Image: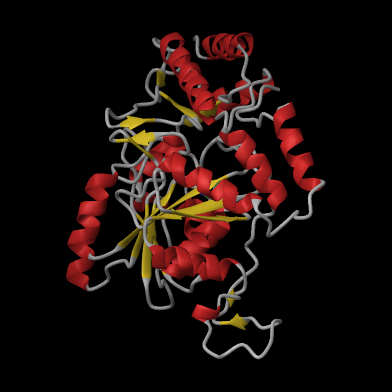
């Protein structure tokens, strides 16, 4: 089976991890801060807080922005579970903003009209979490302008988009957001096994997130409320978690980061070849905005329901049967039993509903060979010919 995504681990990665394993610090050592500063300089952002998953990073971001019971937050219905779970952990109430039919990201038009309505009803969100689906940045400039108009904070779920750019700047620069989050799960752009990071230009938010990452504990005398009564002294200032990344993970991440630009070029090369070779099939191919250089975490095609001789389900099954590990990113959250029980209905998000009925993620990862990609293309041509 040719998978839809796969990590690449080189000898250099193995060596970097071995080095940490043989060192004095396998966690809370110098490698996590080094990885953080490399991410910071890559993204052109002032602060990076590395944690053990993007889910943890999203949760920290919500806590740092003060999201709590009685507050509302909005995200995209077409995303992974974690983009909405993070705010629910804080006791806030979730709602969704339908997607753009071209990019499948949160629609700015839908957001603007939902905000106008919410303002009239006095139910504005405190936080909005746009998701850069498949590696394509959302229209952040427009979303940021709306945040200034309506007074909400912005967390970019950039789990798919490390290495991409928006208006010529790296995703993660936080030019148009309060906090941006990346994931280092093995299917994502670079991996640490499990891992994530929260980036921000706001020193206070960074401070808050790094405190909560490690039990809300400080050993910094300047931040303590009492005078230390001995050299053993530390203070718990607030309730936190253990969301720390290990140095073993950071070593893998830092080593992977050195190949990031090559990875993104390769992903774009694969995307361009699909663009060229799938043209003419009854498929809707990805549309990348002119403002964006996509990281192409995913290459999502949609079955043209009018022109395709086979249904979405048939195409999906035939591809799997023929060894193509296609996938669907994602089952819209309002479809999940958990959200159904909260009263959400997918008909309220017609673009997400239509997306779900047509989308297929094709294999795209740096190690996908030319001949493997040819097999994917040939199989699609066969499956989609009447
Ligand atoms: C993978 C992913 C996450 C969660 O990442 P983890 O590191 O696995 O916690 C969150 N949001 C999106 C959009 C993702 O794809």
Q: Residue at x 62, y 62 (%)?
A: 243
Is residue 82 found left or right of 303 in the rendered image?
right
Please give the name of the residue rendered at 43% of the width and 78% of the height, measured from the top-left corner. 69
Instruction: Name the spot of residue 130 as percent of width and height, x first.
Output: 37, 50
Vertically, is 299 above or below 254? above
Between 188 and 208, the one nearer to me in the picture: 208
User: Of all residues shown, which one is farthest toward the front?
Assistant: 231
The percent coordinates of residue 363 (x first, y second) are 58, 24
Place of residue 151 in the rendered image (x, y in percent of width and height, measured from the top left): 24, 65
Q: Is residue 358 above or below residue 378?
A: below
Q: How is the image coloured?
A: secondary structure
Kindly identify the residue that appears in the image at 20 percent across and 68 percent down. 119
Q: From this viewpoint, is residue 281 visible?
A: yes
- How many labels, in total? 0
Q: Position of residue 253 (x, y in %)?
A: 62, 41
Against 234, is 190 above or below?
Answer: above
Judged left or right of residue 128, residue 230 is: right
The quarter of the image holding the N terminus is top right
Left or right, residue 283 beside residue 150: right
Residue 331 visible in the shown view:
no
Q: Residue at x 52, y 10 (%)?
A: 381
Pick whichever, 212 or 332, lies toward us: 212
The image quadrant of residue 304 is top left
Say whether residue 5 is left or right of residue 278.
Answer: right
């Amino acid at each position: 089976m040719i998978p839809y995504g796969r990590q690449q681990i080189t000898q250099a990665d193995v060596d970097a991890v071995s080095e940490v394993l043989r060192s004095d610090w396998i966690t809370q050592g110098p490698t996590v801060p080094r990885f953080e500063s490399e991410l910071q300089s890559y993204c052109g952002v002032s602060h990076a807080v590395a944690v053990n998953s993007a889910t943890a990073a999203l949760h920290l971001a919500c806590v740092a922005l003060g999201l709590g019971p009685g507050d509302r937050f909005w995200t995209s219905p077409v995303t992974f579970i974690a983009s909405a779970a993070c705010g629910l952990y804080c006791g806030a109430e979730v709602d969704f903003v339908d997607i753009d039919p071209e990019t499948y990201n949160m629609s700015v038009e839908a957001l603007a009209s939902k905000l106008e309505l919410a303002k009239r009803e006095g139910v504005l969100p405190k936080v909005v979490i746009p998701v850069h689906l498949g590696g394509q940045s959302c229209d952040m400039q427009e979303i940021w302008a709306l945040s200034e108009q309506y007074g909400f904070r912005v967390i970019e779920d950039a789990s798919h988009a490390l290495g991409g750019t928006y208006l010529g700047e790296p995703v993660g620069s936080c030019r148009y957001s309060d906090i941006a989050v990346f994931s280092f799960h093995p299917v994502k752009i670079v991996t640490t096994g499990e891992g994530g990071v929260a980036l921000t230009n706001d020193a206070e938010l960074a401070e808050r997130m790094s405190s909560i990452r490690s039990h809300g504990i400080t050993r910094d005398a300047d931040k303590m409320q009492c005078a230390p009564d001995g050299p053993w002294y530390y203070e718990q200032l607030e309730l936190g978690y253990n969301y720390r990344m290990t140095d073993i993970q950071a070593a893998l991440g830092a080593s992977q980061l050195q190949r990031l630009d090559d990875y993104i070029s390769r992903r774009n090369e694969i995307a361009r070849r699909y663009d060229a070779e799938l043209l003419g099939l009854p498929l809707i191919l990805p549309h990348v905005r002119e403002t964006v250089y996509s990281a192409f975490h995913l290459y999502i095609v949609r079955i043209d329901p009018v022109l395709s001789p086979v249904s979405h389900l048939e195409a999906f099954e035939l591809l799997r049967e023929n060894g193509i590990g296609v996938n669907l990113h994602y089952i819209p959250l309002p479809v999940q039993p958990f959200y159904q029980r909260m009263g959400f209905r997918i008909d309220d998000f017609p673009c997400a509903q239509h997306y779900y009925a047509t989308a297929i993620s094709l294999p795209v990862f740096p190690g996908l060979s030319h001949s493997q990609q040819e097999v994917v293309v040939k199989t699609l041509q066969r499956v989609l010919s009447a």
